[in-house]
C-alpha cells in the first residue's frame, strides 16, 4: 500500500540519519578521548563541558534508536496485517470463483 511504502521510505531515511549521527558521535568520542589522553584540555571545565555534550548526544542517539525500534515493530505489525488481509481476500475470491469446484 502507499501508506506502507511511505512509512518504509521514512524509516529508511531515519536509519540513514541515525547511522550518520552514530558515526559522527563515534569519531567525536575518539577525538575527545585522544585529546584527554594527551592533556589537550585547557581546564577541567572545558573537559566537563565537552564530555557533557557528548553524553547528551549519546542519550539522544539512544532515544532515536529506541524510537526506531518501536516504529519498525509498528511497521512490521501493519505489514503482517496487510498480508493477512491479502490472504483472506485471495481465499474469498477463490471461493467466489465459479470456475473452481465446490
Image (cartoon, helix red, strand yellow):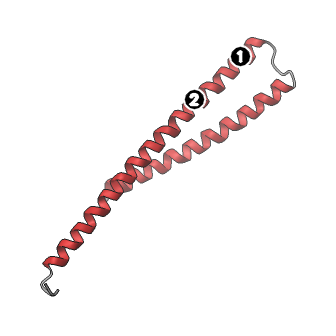
Q: State the image coordinates of residue 83 (x, y, percent, origin top left).
A: 32, 63
The CA distance from mark 1 to mark 2 is 16 Å
Q: State the image coordinates of residue 9 (x, y, percent, origin top left).
A: 44, 52
Question: Residue 52 falls in which quadrant of the image?
Answer: top right
Q: Which residue is mark 1?
A: 48
Q: Which residue is mark 2?
A: 59
Quadrant, the C terminus: bottom left
Tag 1 near tag 2, CB within 8 Å:
no
Question: Residue 40 falls in which quadrant of the image?
Answer: top right
Q: Locate residue 3 relative to residue 88 in the image: left or right.
A: right
Q: Is residue 49 above or below residue 72?
A: above
Q: Residues within 10 Å of mark 1 (few under 14, many from 20)?
A: few
Question: Residue 89 falls in which quadrant of the image?
Answer: bottom left
Kindly state the secondary structure of the residue where label 2 is placed.
helix
Quadrant, the N terminus: bottom left
Kindly state the secondary structure of the residue where label 1 is placed.
helix
Q: State the image coordinates of residue 70 (x, y, percent, origin top left).
A: 43, 42
Of 26 and 91, nearer the camera is: 91
Q: Locate residue 34 relative to residue 72 in the image: left or right.
A: right
In the image, what residue occupies the spot 76% across and 28% down?
Answer: 32
Amino acid at each position: 500500500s502507499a501508506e506502507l511504502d511511505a512509512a518504509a521510505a521514512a524509516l529508511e531515511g531515519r536509519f540513514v540519519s541515525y547511522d550518520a549521527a552514530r558515526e559522527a558521535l563515534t569519531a567525536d568520542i575518539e577525538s575527545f578521548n585522544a585529546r584527554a589522553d594527551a592533556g589537550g584540555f585547557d581546564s577541567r571545565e572545558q573537559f566537563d563541558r565537552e564530555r557533557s555534550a557528548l553524553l547528551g548526544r549519546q542519550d539522544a542517539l539512544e532515544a532515536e534508536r529506541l524510537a526506531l525500534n518501536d516504529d519498525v515493530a509498528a511497521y512490521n505489525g501493519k505489514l503482517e496485517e496487510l498480508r493477512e488481509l491479502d490472504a483472506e481476500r485471495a481465499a474469498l475470491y477463490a471461493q467466489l470463483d465459479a470456475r473452481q469446484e465446490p
